[in-house]
Image (tube, grey):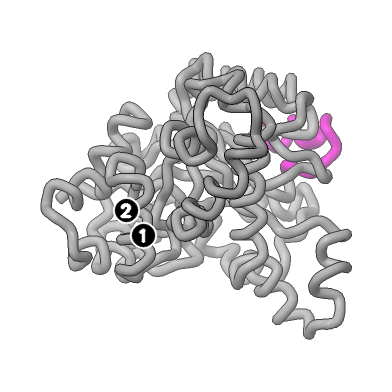
Amino acid sequence: MKVIALEEHMFPRDIIQSANLDFGLRASARVEQLDDVDEGRLQVMDAAGIDVQVLSALGWTVQNLPPARSIDVSRLLNERLASAVGRHPDRFSAFASLPVTDPLAAADELTRTVEELGFVGAMIHGQTRGVFLDHPSMRPILSAAERLEVPLYLHPAPPPPTVMDAYYFDLEPAVAACLSTSGWGWHSETAMHVLRMVVDGVFEELPSLTLIVGHMGEGLPFHLDRIDDMLTPVVTGHSLTVAETLRRNLHLTTSGYVADAPLQCALATFGVEHILFSVDHPFASSTRATTNLRSAPLSERDREQIAHRNAEALLRI
Protein backbone atom coordinates (compact mmCIF):
# COMPACT_ATOMS: atom_id res chain seq x y z
CA MET A 1 0.00 0.00 0.00
CA LYS A 2 1.38 3.39 -1.00
CA VAL A 3 1.61 5.89 1.88
CA ILE A 4 1.81 9.70 1.57
CA ALA A 5 2.38 11.76 4.74
CA LEU A 6 1.39 15.43 4.71
CA GLU A 7 2.58 17.09 7.93
CA GLU A 8 6.29 16.36 7.94
CA HIS A 9 8.48 19.16 9.19
CA MET A 10 11.97 20.35 8.37
CA PHE A 11 14.11 23.38 9.16
CA PRO A 12 17.76 23.87 8.20
CA ARG A 13 19.98 24.28 11.25
CA ASP A 14 22.06 27.02 9.61
CA ILE A 15 18.96 29.16 8.95
CA ILE A 16 17.90 28.82 12.59
CA GLN A 17 21.32 30.11 13.61
CA SER A 18 21.72 32.83 10.99
CA ALA A 19 18.20 34.21 11.53
CA ASN A 20 18.56 33.93 15.33
CA LEU A 21 15.26 32.07 15.69
CA ASP A 22 13.91 30.79 19.00
CA PHE A 23 12.15 27.45 18.55
CA GLY A 24 11.20 26.95 22.17
CA LEU A 25 11.84 23.94 24.39
CA ARG A 26 10.24 21.16 22.36
CA ALA A 27 11.23 22.05 18.81
CA SER A 28 14.77 22.97 19.81
CA ALA A 29 15.29 19.38 20.97
CA ARG A 30 14.50 18.16 17.43
CA VAL A 31 16.86 20.37 15.44
CA GLU A 32 18.96 17.46 14.18
CA GLN A 33 15.91 15.65 12.73
CA LEU A 34 14.46 18.89 11.34
CA ASP A 35 17.74 19.62 9.58
CA ASP A 36 17.91 16.21 7.88
CA VAL A 37 16.16 15.98 4.52
CA ASP A 38 18.36 13.26 3.10
CA GLU A 39 19.51 9.80 4.17
CA GLY A 40 18.47 9.86 7.81
CA ARG A 41 14.94 10.96 6.97
CA LEU A 42 14.69 8.49 4.11
CA GLN A 43 15.73 5.70 6.46
CA VAL A 44 12.92 6.65 8.85
CA MET A 45 10.46 6.67 5.97
CA ASP A 46 11.64 3.32 4.64
CA ALA A 47 11.46 1.68 8.05
CA ALA A 48 7.88 2.91 8.47
CA GLY A 49 6.77 2.16 4.91
CA ILE A 50 6.19 5.80 3.91
CA ASP A 51 6.63 6.46 0.21
CA VAL A 52 6.28 10.25 0.10
CA GLN A 53 6.57 13.07 2.63
CA VAL A 54 5.13 16.51 1.89
CA LEU A 55 7.80 18.63 3.55
CA SER A 56 7.03 21.87 5.36
CA ALA A 57 9.25 24.30 7.25
CA LEU A 58 8.34 24.58 10.92
CA GLY A 59 7.85 28.25 10.35
CA TRP A 60 5.86 30.06 13.02
CA THR A 61 8.97 32.00 14.03
CA VAL A 62 9.57 33.10 10.44
CA GLN A 63 5.92 33.98 10.01
CA ASN A 64 6.17 36.55 12.80
CA LEU A 65 9.36 38.25 11.67
CA PRO A 66 9.23 41.83 10.38
CA PRO A 67 8.01 41.79 6.78
CA ALA A 68 11.31 42.34 4.94
CA ARG A 69 13.11 39.74 7.05
CA SER A 70 10.25 37.28 6.78
CA ILE A 71 10.27 37.60 2.99
CA ASP A 72 13.99 36.85 2.84
CA VAL A 73 13.90 33.87 5.20
CA SER A 74 10.74 32.42 3.65
CA ARG A 75 12.27 32.57 0.20
CA LEU A 76 15.45 30.92 1.47
CA LEU A 77 13.43 28.17 3.15
CA ASN A 78 11.48 27.56 -0.03
CA GLU A 79 14.68 27.25 -2.03
CA ARG A 80 15.90 24.65 0.48
CA LEU A 81 12.60 22.79 0.23
CA ALA A 82 12.83 22.84 -3.55
CA SER A 83 16.40 21.54 -3.35
CA ALA A 84 15.31 18.61 -1.16
CA VAL A 85 12.49 17.78 -3.57
CA GLY A 86 14.92 18.05 -6.49
CA ARG A 87 17.34 15.60 -4.88
CA HIS A 88 14.57 13.11 -4.07
CA PRO A 89 11.67 13.84 -6.44
CA ASP A 90 10.02 10.45 -5.89
CA ARG A 91 10.09 10.81 -2.10
CA PHE A 92 9.35 14.44 -1.33
CA SER A 93 6.91 17.19 -2.23
CA ALA A 94 6.54 20.53 -0.43
CA PHE A 95 4.28 23.12 1.16
CA ALA A 96 5.60 26.68 0.89
CA SER A 97 6.67 28.88 3.77
CA LEU A 98 5.04 32.31 3.50
CA PRO A 99 5.95 35.78 4.88
CA VAL A 100 2.48 36.32 6.33
CA THR A 101 3.37 39.68 7.92
CA ASP A 102 3.29 40.99 4.33
CA PRO A 103 0.20 39.37 2.78
CA LEU A 104 0.82 40.71 -0.72
CA ALA A 105 4.36 39.36 -0.69
CA ALA A 106 3.04 36.10 0.74
CA ALA A 107 0.58 35.78 -2.14
CA ASP A 108 3.42 36.42 -4.59
CA GLU A 109 5.61 33.81 -2.91
CA LEU A 110 2.80 31.26 -2.94
CA THR A 111 2.33 31.89 -6.66
CA ARG A 112 6.06 31.59 -7.32
CA THR A 113 6.49 28.36 -5.40
CA VAL A 114 3.48 26.71 -7.01
CA GLU A 115 4.06 27.88 -10.59
CA GLU A 116 7.87 27.79 -10.69
CA LEU A 117 8.87 25.23 -8.06
CA GLY A 118 5.94 22.83 -8.27
CA PHE A 119 4.89 23.12 -4.62
CA VAL A 120 1.48 21.70 -3.70
CA GLY A 121 0.27 24.47 -1.38
CA ALA A 122 1.47 26.30 1.71
CA MET A 123 1.56 25.85 5.46
CA ILE A 124 0.51 28.71 7.74
CA HIS A 125 1.10 28.53 11.48
CA GLY A 126 -1.78 30.00 13.45
CA GLN A 127 -2.35 33.71 13.84
CA THR A 128 0.30 36.23 12.90
CA ARG A 129 0.94 38.97 15.44
CA GLY A 130 -2.65 38.62 16.61
CA VAL A 131 -4.15 38.59 13.11
CA PHE A 132 -6.20 35.57 12.00
CA LEU A 133 -6.75 34.48 8.42
CA ASP A 134 -10.32 35.83 8.34
CA HIS A 135 -8.99 39.39 8.63
CA PRO A 136 -9.43 41.33 5.36
CA SER A 137 -5.69 41.99 5.18
CA MET A 138 -5.14 38.24 4.61
CA ARG A 139 -7.40 37.98 1.55
CA PRO A 140 -4.51 38.19 -0.96
CA ILE A 141 -3.09 34.92 0.41
CA LEU A 142 -6.45 33.15 0.47
CA SER A 143 -7.42 34.42 -2.98
CA ALA A 144 -4.10 33.28 -4.42
CA ALA A 145 -4.57 29.79 -2.96
CA GLU A 146 -8.05 29.54 -4.45
CA ARG A 147 -6.87 30.83 -7.83
CA LEU A 148 -3.95 28.40 -7.89
CA GLU A 149 -6.21 25.55 -6.72
CA VAL A 150 -3.87 24.56 -3.90
CA PRO A 151 -4.73 24.03 -0.23
CA LEU A 152 -3.50 25.94 2.78
CA TYR A 153 -2.45 23.74 5.69
CA LEU A 154 -3.31 25.57 8.92
CA HIS A 155 -0.86 24.32 11.52
CA PRO A 156 -0.97 25.31 15.20
CA ALA A 157 1.47 27.79 16.70
CA PRO A 158 2.32 28.86 20.23
CA PRO A 159 -0.19 31.35 21.67
CA PRO A 160 0.46 35.08 21.75
CA PRO A 161 1.77 36.63 24.99
CA THR A 162 -1.67 37.83 26.11
CA VAL A 163 -3.02 34.28 26.02
CA MET A 164 0.05 32.91 27.81
CA ASP A 165 -0.38 35.52 30.53
CA ALA A 166 -4.08 34.80 30.97
CA TYR A 167 -4.00 30.98 31.06
CA TYR A 168 -0.52 29.66 31.79
CA PHE A 169 1.52 32.30 33.65
CA ASP A 170 1.60 30.51 37.03
CA LEU A 171 2.55 27.03 35.79
CA GLU A 172 5.98 25.44 35.78
CA PRO A 173 7.62 26.45 32.47
CA ALA A 174 7.84 23.00 30.90
CA VAL A 175 4.21 22.28 31.84
CA ALA A 176 3.04 25.66 30.54
CA ALA A 177 4.95 25.14 27.27
CA CYS A 178 3.23 21.79 26.70
CA LEU A 179 -0.27 22.65 27.93
CA SER A 180 -0.35 25.83 25.86
CA THR A 181 0.67 23.97 22.71
CA SER A 182 0.59 20.25 21.92
CA GLY A 183 -0.90 19.24 25.27
CA TRP A 184 -4.12 21.13 24.52
CA GLY A 185 -3.97 24.86 23.86
CA TRP A 186 -2.97 25.15 20.24
CA HIS A 187 -5.43 22.48 19.12
CA SER A 188 -8.38 24.44 20.46
CA GLU A 189 -6.98 27.70 19.06
CA THR A 190 -6.62 26.16 15.60
CA ALA A 191 -10.21 24.93 15.72
CA MET A 192 -11.33 28.43 16.72
CA HIS A 193 -9.24 29.86 13.87
CA VAL A 194 -11.08 27.65 11.37
CA LEU A 195 -14.45 28.61 12.83
CA ARG A 196 -13.56 32.31 12.63
CA MET A 197 -12.97 31.83 8.91
CA VAL A 198 -16.35 30.13 8.55
CA VAL A 199 -18.47 32.59 10.52
CA ASP A 200 -16.69 35.62 9.02
CA GLY A 201 -17.68 34.51 5.53
CA VAL A 202 -14.28 33.54 4.10
CA PHE A 203 -15.70 30.43 2.44
CA GLU A 204 -18.76 32.28 1.19
CA GLU A 205 -16.44 34.69 -0.60
CA LEU A 206 -13.97 31.98 -1.65
CA PRO A 207 -16.06 28.82 -1.97
CA SER A 208 -13.31 26.80 -3.66
CA LEU A 209 -10.66 27.54 -1.03
CA THR A 210 -9.41 24.34 0.59
CA LEU A 211 -8.09 24.28 4.13
CA ILE A 212 -6.28 21.37 5.80
CA VAL A 213 -5.88 20.93 9.54
CA GLY A 214 -3.99 18.20 11.33
CA HIS A 215 -4.34 16.28 14.58
CA MET A 216 -7.52 14.51 13.44
CA GLY A 217 -9.32 17.81 12.95
CA GLU A 218 -8.16 19.71 16.05
CA GLY A 219 -11.28 18.64 17.98
CA LEU A 220 -13.76 19.81 15.34
CA PRO A 221 -15.15 16.32 14.54
CA PHE A 222 -16.05 15.66 18.18
CA HIS A 223 -17.72 19.06 18.62
CA LEU A 224 -19.28 19.43 15.16
CA ASP A 225 -22.93 18.80 16.06
CA ARG A 226 -22.79 21.22 18.99
CA ILE A 227 -20.96 23.82 16.90
CA ASP A 228 -23.61 23.58 14.17
CA ASP A 229 -26.53 23.76 16.60
CA MET A 230 -25.17 26.85 18.34
CA LEU A 231 -23.44 28.83 15.58
CA THR A 232 -25.56 28.29 12.49
CA PRO A 233 -28.65 30.14 13.87
CA VAL A 234 -26.60 33.26 14.59
CA VAL A 235 -24.50 33.24 11.40
CA THR A 236 -26.86 34.95 8.97
CA GLY A 237 -26.68 35.45 5.24
CA HIS A 238 -24.64 32.33 4.43
CA SER A 239 -25.66 29.83 1.78
CA LEU A 240 -24.54 26.82 3.87
CA THR A 241 -24.68 25.87 7.51
CA VAL A 242 -21.47 25.91 9.52
CA ALA A 243 -21.23 22.12 9.35
CA GLU A 244 -21.93 22.09 5.61
CA THR A 245 -19.20 24.65 5.02
CA LEU A 246 -16.69 22.67 7.07
CA ARG A 247 -17.55 19.46 5.23
CA ARG A 248 -17.09 21.22 1.89
CA ASN A 249 -13.92 23.21 2.51
CA LEU A 250 -11.99 21.40 5.24
CA HIS A 251 -9.76 18.33 5.07
CA LEU A 252 -8.25 16.60 8.11
CA THR A 253 -5.02 14.71 8.62
CA THR A 254 -4.19 12.08 11.19
CA SER A 255 -0.97 13.76 12.33
CA GLY A 256 0.02 12.83 15.86
CA TYR A 257 -3.03 10.58 16.41
CA VAL A 258 -2.73 6.80 16.52
CA ALA A 259 -5.98 5.82 18.28
CA ASP A 260 -9.04 4.31 16.66
CA ALA A 261 -11.70 6.36 18.48
CA PRO A 262 -10.69 9.78 17.09
CA LEU A 263 -10.42 8.27 13.62
CA GLN A 264 -13.90 6.78 13.83
CA CYS A 265 -15.27 10.15 14.99
CA ALA A 266 -13.60 11.93 12.06
CA LEU A 267 -14.92 9.34 9.62
CA ALA A 268 -18.46 9.65 11.00
CA THR A 269 -18.52 13.45 10.83
CA PHE A 270 -16.42 14.34 7.76
CA GLY A 271 -16.33 11.17 5.67
CA VAL A 272 -13.33 9.23 4.43
CA GLU A 273 -12.86 11.52 1.41
CA HIS A 274 -11.75 14.32 3.73
CA ILE A 275 -9.18 12.41 5.81
CA LEU A 276 -5.50 12.10 4.89
CA PHE A 277 -2.57 10.36 6.54
CA SER A 278 0.15 12.29 8.35
CA VAL A 279 2.78 11.58 10.99
CA ASP A 280 4.00 14.96 12.35
CA HIS A 281 7.65 14.02 11.88
CA PRO A 282 9.89 14.46 13.85
CA PHE A 283 7.51 15.02 16.76
CA ALA A 284 5.72 11.68 16.35
CA SER A 285 6.78 8.16 15.42
CA SER A 286 6.47 7.31 11.74
CA THR A 287 6.46 3.58 12.47
CA ARG A 288 3.75 3.90 15.10
CA ALA A 289 1.63 5.99 12.71
CA THR A 290 1.86 3.55 9.80
CA THR A 291 1.30 0.57 12.10
CA ASN A 292 -1.93 2.16 13.27
CA LEU A 293 -2.94 2.98 9.70
CA ARG A 294 -2.52 -0.65 8.68
CA SER A 295 -4.35 -2.06 11.72
CA ALA A 296 -7.19 0.47 12.10
CA PRO A 297 -10.73 -0.94 11.65
CA LEU A 298 -11.17 0.25 8.06
CA SER A 299 -12.22 -1.31 4.80
CA GLU A 300 -9.29 -1.73 2.44
CA ARG A 301 -10.85 0.85 0.13
CA ASP A 302 -11.01 3.41 2.96
CA ARG A 303 -7.49 2.55 4.10
CA GLU A 304 -6.16 3.21 0.60
CA GLN A 305 -8.02 6.53 0.43
CA ILE A 306 -6.54 7.75 3.68
CA ALA A 307 -3.09 6.37 2.91
CA HIS A 308 -2.63 7.96 -0.49
CA ARG A 309 -5.62 8.38 -2.79
CA ASN A 310 -7.06 11.46 -1.10
CA ALA A 311 -3.65 13.14 -1.08
CA GLU A 312 -3.10 12.32 -4.73
CA ALA A 313 -6.44 13.87 -5.63
CA LEU A 314 -6.15 16.96 -3.41
CA LEU A 315 -2.49 17.74 -4.09
CA ARG A 316 -2.29 16.32 -7.60
CA ILE A 317 0.76 14.20 -6.82
The residue wearing badge 1 is 265
Of 248 and 27, nearer the camera is 248
Return the mark for residue 149: none
Of 196 and 231, nearer the camera is 231
Residue 11: give x, y in percent of width and height. Answer: 59, 51
Q: Quadrant of the C terminus?
A: top left
What's the magenta region? Answer: 63-77
* Residue 83 appearing in the image: no
Residue 67 in magenta stretch: yes
Judged from this view, the residue extending furthest toward the bottom is: 172
Q: Magenta: predominant secondary structure element? A: helix
Q: Residue at coordinates 37% horizontally, 31% vertically from top-left?
A: 315
The residue wearing badge 2 is 268
Q: Quadrant of residue 184?
A: bottom right
* Residue 86 appearing in the image: yes
Q: Is residue 113 left or right of residue 253?
A: right
User: Looking at the image, do the residues carrying marks 2 and 1 touch, with CB atoms under 8 Å apart?
Assistant: yes
Q: Residue at coordinates 29% horizontally, 38% vertically from top-left?
A: 310
Residue 39: give x, y in percent of width and height. Answer: 37, 55
Q: Residues within 10 Å of mark 2 (few under 14, many from 20)?
A: few
Q: Amino acid at mark 1?
A: Cys
Q: Quadrant of residue 41?
A: bottom left
Q: Is residue 130 left or right of residue 251?
A: right
Q: Please, what secondary structure does the residue beneath circle 2 have?
A: helix
Residue 43: give x, y in percent of width and height. Answer: 31, 61
Q: Residues within 10 Å of mark 1 (few under 14, many from 20)?
A: some
Q: Please, what secondary structure does the residue beneath circle 1 have?
A: helix
